Image (tube, rainbow, N blue to C red):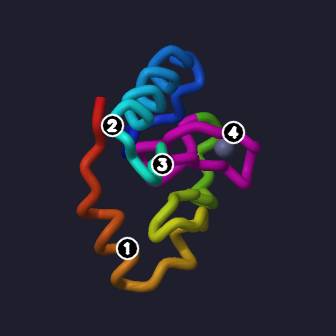
Amino acid sequence: MEMPSPPMHNIEAVETIIRHMHDSDMGYGGINYPVDFCVGCNLTGVFNEDNCPRCGSANIRRVRRITGYLSTTDRFNDSKLAELKDRVTHR
Ligand SMILES: [Zn+2]
């Protein structure tokens, strides 16, 4: 399950997803969402631009989960970056 942003204000959606996973007898399920962090001003969120929307810094750490592990995107190899690019979000 790939979400376009953290479900911080939609706890009901998270519960619905988990209950659906349970009712579908899934052996394993996960909910992924992006987290971006500005090293310049500590702003956290999902930044669609290359720079921080608050302070303009280009020093952004982008945390994603590919093949089970959370990591910043600068540590991804080419195949993990390709998988990240191919992900489709569900709204
Ligand atoms: Zn910033």
In depth, the one of 7 and 55 nearer the eye is 7
What's the distance in space between the residues labelled 2 and 1, CA to CA? 30 Å
- Dot 2: what SS? loop
What's the distance in space between the residues labelled 3 and 1, CA to CA? 19 Å
Query: Amino acid type of disc 3?
Result: Gly
Instruction: Identify residue for label 2.
Output: 24
What's the distance in space between the residues labelled 4 and 2, CA to CA? 37 Å
Point out which mark residue 81 bears.
Answer: 1
Instruction: Identify residue for label 3.
Output: 30
Q: Position of residue 88 (x, y in %)?
A: 25, 49
Is the stretch drawn in magenta largely helix, strand or loop? loop
Q: Position of residue 33 (x, y in %)?
A: 48, 44
Q: Nearer the viewer, mark 2 or mark 1?
A: 2
Instruction: Identify residue for label 4.
Output: 43
In depth, the one of 82 and 10 nearer the eye is 10
Q: Is mark 4 within 8 Å of ligand 1?
A: yes
Give the mark nearer the N terminus: 3 vs 4: 3
